Image (tube, rainbow, N blue to C red):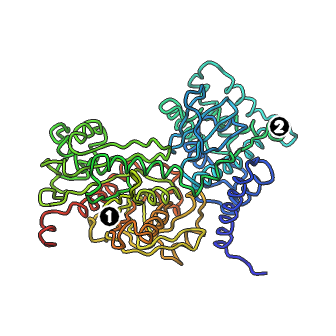
Amino acid sequence: MLELTQSQRARSAIREFKTITESLAIRGFYRPSGRFGKALENCLRELSPEIYGTMNDPRVVELKGLEYVIDRLPQGIEQATKIILTDEDQFDNTPFLKIEPLKRRRKCYRINNNELCLIISRGISEIYDIVTHMTFLNIEAKKIFKRMHDDYGNIRAEWSKLEKVVNRTDALSSEELDSAIWNMSIILGRPYHETREFYEYLEQNRFEHQSSNGLFSLIYHLGKRLQRDQQSRDDALVIYFTPSLMSIIGHQRYGKLWASKVDHEIFSRNLHHRALHIISANLHSVVNLIYGYAATKSSLKANVDTKDIYAFCAALKDKSSQILEFALKRGLYLIPDQSGANIDCQLIDTALIGDIEFHPELNIDLINIKDKPLILVMDYAFGAQAFEAMEQLLKAFEQNGQKKALKDGSISIMGKAGILPGDKGDIMLATAHVCEGTSDNYLFDNELSAKDFDSEVRVYVGPMATVLGTSLQNKDVLTMFMSDWKAVGLEMEGGHYHKAINASIIKGNIPSNTKVRYAYYASDNPLKSGSTLAAGAMGKEGIKPTYMITKVILEKILPFAKSVEQKS
């Protein structure tokens, strides 16, 4: 029998996880502690994703992985015994509490203490995401459950102490808190300082964002849920997929509604005859670069270095409302999402920007551009959702039975991605997208090149791997992408965007020579311990690459006067 390499086994585990997840969505339900849940668990254990650290070590609970997952699932997930995934948001004018995870744009509703409903509006990638997180959560819950009892099956003293803390109605004193965290560290198999750090992180989010129930409640209820699973099948956690859910996958229901709203905004303002430049990015960097200097120059603190464009941009963090008020009077239109796709947009009519002063290091020109373009900034899509959003956006708009095509100018994709050969804050320029789990691979001419960027930031050029999920990767798979495909990074949307662009060219919706730009800044390096996404957000180190990419894209769309003269 042919022996598989570690990379081949990992890729097989990813394929099996994907297949099981899709079949369960069609089946309609599964129990994480049941046969199918164990099959998913085996796949995840075989894969052993870097982002989940010590998941496969039965002696310790993986805290960074827990932090990552809890931030992306709704508050109270640890107490739920029934989780329903549906595409239909039927909760307007109902008494059910709407909740949203801290770091994932996802509508969720608490039906009661034990039942949650999650609205799936972003396609199959969102289903993979939730099932992966729930599988990891169940693995860690099993570890916690084992720590409840000693070798003789009796409740351990540490667990009894935890139960008393959870059931207390009054606040712990400083000494009592220290003792409780020490006790928790024994249950988790983690050092005191790591447990304390996790406790403080959850407490901060509990009070600031209401996104978690705190460390003691989280660990206690994860263990108790496993106990209920074993004691009674009726009380075991069940994850349901509504019948309508799979029928909308591939039918682009939310994408059509979203694109229709964007098209309506453009046509209702009689702007459809102008070249449209689409930018997939965050919703602050383009607006800040175009309007920020004129809006805030006189009000910034004296110690801010306004001459350095990146130091200046860093100082704009608390000036968003001031910049927005300024921009709304000079060509900026907001298009908040009303479809459920969770992709807000901004439309910038450059003809209305006027003769405002731009930052001296921003080499753009409006005065000498005869045909003033439109810029559409669309917020980040999620995984495979990128295909339906872009494909629907590039279609001709139907109005009164007639099809009216948008005049497309260019498509720029700016995103954050995991880097393979470099570090956080570096930049990656894609020359192709290699789609994991399929034979879809896309070569293209990227209008961006390394020479467009400042030499002080490292730029890596090469293929990008478009993966099923950031939680479904390990070193063996990533090393394969880097060695076989010469990939410089991994992300979740680029291949799906380009599939939509190619489809639109074939259908005649956009010209074959439409300019495309793909640039990513490194949010993590999943091959380096302590540098995965679970290690935390980028912080200030993400400002320079984010604005550098935005700056280069704007300079391509609105070239400086010298560039205009050279072209003419």
Q: Where is residue 387 drawn, in percent x and y?
A: 49, 60
At x 16%, y 58%, the residue is 365
Asked if residue 384 shows in the view, the reply is yes
Image x and y of residue 258, in percent = 45, 48
Residue 282 appears in the figure:
no
Residue shown at 23% from the left, 45% from the top: 331
**Residue 16 or residue 70, whichever sits in front:** 16
Q: Secondary structure at mark 1?
A: strand
Please state if 292 lies on the left or on the right of 495 as rendered. Answer: left
Residue type of the residue flagged with mark 2? Asp
Which secondary structure lies at badge 2?
helix
Q: Check the image and name the residue furthest to the right.
A: 152
State the CA–CA distance, disc 1 to disc 2: 55 Å
The number of numbered badges drawn on the structure is 2
Report which residue position mark 2 lands on. 234
Left or right, 283 with respect to 150, comes to left
Q: Position of residue 280 (x, y in %)?
A: 38, 56
Q: Of the residues tagged 1 and 2, which is closer to the observer?
A: 1
Name, please, the residue furthest toward the top. 170
Position of 304 with respect to 407 (left or right) is: left
- Using the image, determine if residue 527 lies above or below residue 204: below
Among the two numbered marks 1 and 2 on one chain, the one whose residue lies closer to the N terminus: 2
Instruction: Tell me the amino acid under the disc marked 1.
Output: Ser
Among all residues in the image, which is located at the extreme bottom?
2
Of residue 396 and residue 544, the one placed in the foreground of this image is: 396
Q: Where does label 1 land, which residue?
A: 410
Between residue 194 and residue 377, name the one nearer to us.
377
